[in-house]
Amino acid sequence: MWWALGFVLVLAALELGIWIAVKVLKTRFQWLITPADITPKIDPDLIDKYCASSFDPDLGWTRKPGTTGEDRTLSDTASYAIDDRGSRRNPGFEGQPATIAVFGDSFAFCRLVNDDETWPHYLARALDENVLNFGVGNYGLDQACLRMERELPGLDCRMVIMCVVPESMARIHSYWKHYFEFGNVLAFKPRFTLEGDGLVLHKSAVRTADDFRTYEKHAADIQRLDHFFERKFLNDLLRFPHIVGMVRRGRRHVPILWHLVCGLLTGRFESGRRRAFSLVLRENQRATMWLYADDRARALFAALVRRFVEHVRRAGAEPLLLILPQPIDLDQRDRDQSSYGPLLAELESEIAVVDMTDRFHAHANRDRLFVDGPLGPHVSPAGNQIIADAIAAESQRIAPREHQAPITACPPRSQAGGR
């Protein structure tokens, strides 16, 4: 009986300790979620600020024309400016007609580097023609396609580049990013589903500022349309009894809490936070890999690529799909694995595909290819130069100009993100 009582007391103490740790750390690490996060209250001031700076009812969010900002790296800052048409500033080419347009995510926008250190800027210098950069952070292929369809009628391009990271496979299955990127509560977005052989667009559940305040009325539909609500979010909830969750999802919860608690107790919380965040990225990549192994998910990705191809060719331009790996994708390549390689090989019969994974993987010093920041690494100026050189050569093959300027490499101004 005393052994049993002692065991119960140990379990109770462990349960209390986990509860306290989660309660203390949750405010400093958004990827610890509890049942209250299923339909969290959103700060009204945060809503107002977001609607003024980024909100877009059709796309979810976008960069507002005429705005500027800074990205913080681990050691410096990098600045960016958005021109009057909503594309990133391309220094030295302002006002010139654009013959190439870029759409996609933050690797298209080029987070963590300055305006004159992006690969679209290096591409413009190599080809001596203006390149418009409409990339937006955290976009999926679905949102990037919708942005392209909005902008394309006002463009006169010979080539349109769609640039996404492999994780875009996961992003196109999100309807509310909070259920995949825990804590990203403002990121409601549209998404497509496959019904029969066709794409069906589901507009964002939040289309006005008031919708943010009353989104709970649509919670059931949001959860039904979001792939990750049941498959990931509910599995990662920390709830009573916490010990059960720690055992069931020990590969995730135990090391994350360990790094955070150690960082807090040693006074090096930021270091612990980065280690915990790397585990979150690894878990998200694992979820993405599962989707690349799913026939239905691959079919959705392929259908979106075909939609992109159809709209671009109808406009008289040539499409190009550019895949830029994150460091975690290169780690996977180290193990001779490529979850997305087979799908890209299938798509090459329909569209020109440039996958930078092998080029980056073979680089002698991969650390030079990326700059680190609070939301994860992005490509450095040196890496952006490599991308621009690859695209410049490919552009001659798929969309040649009559009087093509000589293609020359333009060395980046610096080798790090920021001045």
Image: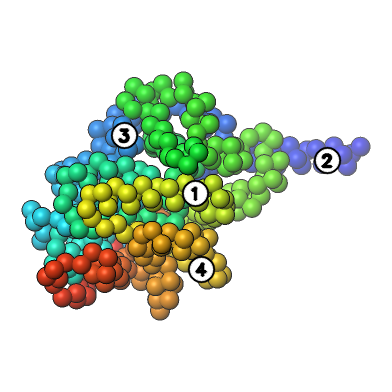
Q: Which residue is mark 4?
A: 333
Q: Could you tell me if residue 333 is visible in this image?
A: yes
Whichever of callouts 3 and 4 sits on the residue coming sooner in the sequence is 3
Q: CA distance from mark 3 to mark 4?
A: 36 Å
- Label 3 Cα crowd, 10 Å radius (few <14 / some 14-19 / many 20+): some
Q: Which residue is mark 1?
A: 299
For label 3, the SS is loop
Q: CA distance from mark 1 to mark 3?
A: 24 Å
Q: Are marks 3 and 4 in contact (CB under 8 Å)?
A: no
What colour-coding does the image apply? rainbow
Q: CA distance from mark 1 to mark 2?
A: 55 Å
For label 1, the SS is helix
The residue at the far left in this view is: 95
Q: Are marks 1 and 4 in contact (CB under 8 Å)?
A: no
Q: Which residue is mark 3?
A: 58
Whichever of callouts 2 and 3 sits on the residue coming sooner in the sequence is 2
Q: Quadrant of residue 97?
A: bottom left
Q: Amino acid at mark 3?
A: Asp
Task: Name the front one of labels 1 and 3.
Answer: 1
Of residue 326 and residue 221, the one placed in the foreground of this image is 221
Task: Name the front one of labels 1 and 2.
Answer: 1
- Label 4 Cα crowd, 10 Å radius (few <14 / some 14-19 / many 20+): some
Up the image or down, 31 lies above or below 47; here it is below
Whichever of callouts 1 and 4 sits on the residue coming sooner in the sequence is 1
Q: Amino acid at mark 4?
A: Arg
Q: Which residue is mark 2?
A: 6
Q: CA distance from mark 2 to mark 4?
A: 49 Å
Q: Could you tell me if residue 259 is visible in this image?
A: no
Q: Residue 133: horizontal and vertical position, in percent?
A: 23, 53
Residue located 16% across and 52% down the image? 156
Q: Are marks 2 and 4 in contact (CB under 8 Å)?
A: no
